[in-house]
Amino acid sequence: MATDDVKREAESLRAEIERHNRLYYQEAAPEISDRDYDRLMQRLTEIEAEHPELATPDSPTQRVGGEPLSQFATVVHAVPMLSIDNTYNYDEVREWDARVRRGLNAGETVRYVVELKVDGVAVSVRYEDGKFVLGSTRGDGERGDDISANLRTVRDLPLKLHGKAPEVLEVRGEVYMTNAELARLNELRKEAGDKPFENPRNSTAGSLKLLDSRLCARRRLKFIGHGLGEVRGLDETSFYDVFQKLKALGIPVSPHVVRCDSIDEVIEHAKEWETRRNTLDFQTDGLVVKVDDLGQRNRLGSRSKSPRWVIAFKYEAEQAITKITQITVQVGKTGKLTPVAELEPVRLAGTTVKRATLHNADEIRRKDVREGDTVVVQKAGEIIPQVVRVETEARTGNEVEFVFPDRCPSCEAPVVRDPGEVDYRCSNRPSACSQQFERRLRQYAHRDSLDIEGLGDKLVDQLVKTNLVRSLPDLYRLDAATLAGLERMGEKSAENLLAGVEQSKRKTLDRFINGLAIRHVGVRMSEVLATRFRTLAELRNASLADLEAVPEVGAVVAASVHEFLQEPDHQRLLDELTELGVDPQPYTPVSSTAANLPFLGKTFVLTGTLPKRSRAEAETLIKSLGGKVTGSVSKSTGYVLAGADPGSKLDKAHALGVAVLDEAEFERMAGVENS
C-alpha cells in the first residue's frame, strides 16, 4: 500500500505535468526542456507501476494509449450533433441575418460570435464532475463511435477540468492535425517507404479510427472546442462568455474568436481572414457565425438537419494560374488510364503544385485542354489539384492538342473503352503491365487490405522493377537473403517484411477481397461480399445470380466480380495463392452505422456528366454505402450529385435548398480513393 508521501508525490506530479502540457500545447510557452518533462513522466509511471491503486483515469500516463480494441462501441448523443448550413456568398450571409432577425422580436439587438472553421473531424467530449468520461465521433448526428481511448491521447484535451466544473459538460469540437505535424509524419512515412498522407484532415480521420490508441498517440493530434452538447450546471447566457468559461476550465478554444455587433462587422472580419488564413499552421476553409445570445438561439430553434442560429461562410477554393508543360497518362490498379497535367510549379493553398488531374479523355475534350495552355488550377476539396479552365485568350498558337493514346503507356497493349463508360483501360492482364501490377501490389499491401507491414510504395517499386515480384503469389516466394540485398533493406527489415507477408495469409476475407483490386469493389463492398460468402471457395463458386441476390450488390458490381473470378488468369492466381498457404479467415461484420455506411438513409439524385465515373458507377457506389438513388428532386432529397451540363434538376435543388455536391465532395463523403 502506498504511503501518504508517495500518494502526495503522485498527485503533485500529475498536477505539474498537466500544467506543463497546458503551457506547451495551448499557450506555446514551455518552461522546461523535453528531457525534464520526460523525467517527470518517468517518475509518475514508476509510482503508478509500483502502486496501481494510485493510477487514475485522468493521469497523464493514460495519454500513451492502451491495448487495441476489437471494434468501437456505439454512442447515442444526448443532444444531436446537427450539421451547419454553409454559403460561399456574402449576400447569402446577409439574407441569413435577415432571417434571424425575422425569427426574433422586432428591434431586438442581435450580436454574433465568429470563429475560424477548423478543417478537422467533429467530436463530442463529455465531462462529469470535471472528469473526462467519454469521447465520440459525430457519426450520423444521432449516434457515433466511442473513441474515448484515442481522445485520451490528445495532449491539449484535459482529462480533468480546472476549477469548479459543471456537473455535466459536453464540449463539441474538432480534432485536427497541424501542417507541421503532417510534414513530420510524412517524412517518417517516406523513410519507411509508405505512401504519405494527402492532407491533415484525412490523416486525422484515419488516426481517430485506429483501434490501437497507442498508434494514435504518436500522431500529436490537437483539439479545439466550439460548441456544447448536454450541459448541467453552466450559468452563462452569452456564447462568447461560454468560450471564456471553457478556456478557464482548460479546454482549448480558438484564440481568434470575436463578437460582432452587426452583420457588416461579420463580413469585414471574413474579408480580413480570406488571405490571413494561409498564415496559420492548420487548415481552415472559412468562418462559423453564431448568434451569441443562448436565449435567442432557443427561440430560433432548428430545422431537421441544422440550427437556424448558425451559418458557415466558406471561402471559394483557392485558385492559381500556371502552364501545362505536358500531359501524361498514368495507369491505375484496375487498368484505368488517367490523364495528368504536368505543370510549371505554382503555390496553391500553402503547397507547391506540380501536377493536376484531368480525369479522362472526355473531360480534356470538354475543356479543350492542350499542352502549353495557360490554365487555372484549384484543389478539389482541398485535396487533389484539378484544372478548372483554360485561359484561351492567352494562347499563342504553339499549344498542342492532346491525342489520347490507343496503346497503354506502360505495356503497349491496346486501350479499350467499355460501352457507356467514360474511362479508357489497358486491355492487358495486370501481371503483364508493370504499372498496373505495381498499383495492384500496393493495393494488396494497403492497410485497408492485407496490411503488410514494411511493404511500402518504394519497396513495391523495387520489387516490380527488379522482377522479383511479377504476380501476387511471387510475394510469398521471397526469401530473406534476396530481400536483404535490396536498397535500404537490411537483414532485420527483410525478416520483418517476411513476417508481415506470412501474417497476411490469414487475414479476414473482406481484406483479401479488397486487396484483389476488383473493379467497383472497395472496402465496404468487400465487407458485404465477405458477409454473404464466408469462405474464398464459396465466393469463387458463386454464380452471377448468387451475386446479384446479395443486398447492396447491384448488377454492375455483380458482373464485375463474376467476370474477375471466372477469368482464367485470375483463377490460376487464386489457385496459386491457396497452394502457397493463403487462407482468408471468415469476416465478422460490425453493425451497420454511419461509420461504415456514410450514406445510410440518404437519398441522391444525379444530374449531368461526372468527370471520373459513369452514372451507373456512381449509383453503385451510393447504394453500396447505404444510400438510395431516385430520379426526381423533392424536399426529401438528401443530395444532388451534379456534373457537367446539369439539367433542370439542379435548378430545382437550388429552389428547394437541397445540398448540391460535385464529384470531389461526393468522393470525400464516400471515403473513396483514386484508382
Image: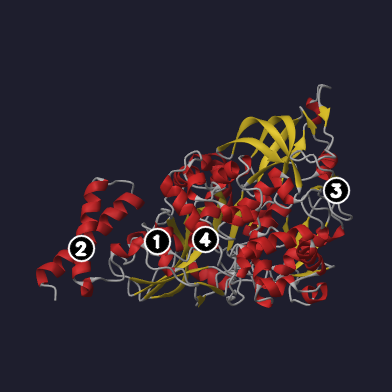
Observer-side mark, 4 or 2, equals: 4
Task: Report the Cα–Cα distance between label 1 and label 3.
Answer: 47 Å
Residue in the picture at 72% in, 36% down: 341
In primary-sequence order, the first of circles 1 and 3 is 1
Residue 473, labelled with which disc?
none
Quarter of the image for residue 595 reads: bottom right
Give the amino acid type for the residue marked by disc 2 in the picture: Glu
Taking the image as shown, residue 450 lies to the left or right of residue 365, namely left
Residue at the image point whose x is 54% and y is 43% from the top: 273
Read off the residue under disc 2.
46
Spatial CA distance of label 3 from label 2 is: 65 Å
Q: Secondary structure at mark 2?
A: helix
Q: Does label 1 or label 4 sit earlier along the sequence?
A: 1
Q: Which is more foreground, mark 1 or mark 4?
A: 4
Circle 4/circle 3 CB separation < 8 Å: no
Marks 3 and 2: which is nearer the front? 3
**Along the horizontal axis of the image, is 362 left or right of 228?**
right
**C-alpha separation, residue under disc 4 versus residue under disc 2:** 37 Å
Residue depicted at 39% across the width and 61% down the height: 214
Say left or right for 202 vs 675: left
Position of the N terminus by quadrant:
bottom left
- Residue closest to the eye, 272 or 489: 489
* Residue 542: % across, % down: 76, 74
User: Residue 655: x, y in percent?
Assistant: 79, 62
Q: Is residue 268 above or below residue 654?
A: above
> In the image, residue 619 lies at what x, y percent?
78, 64
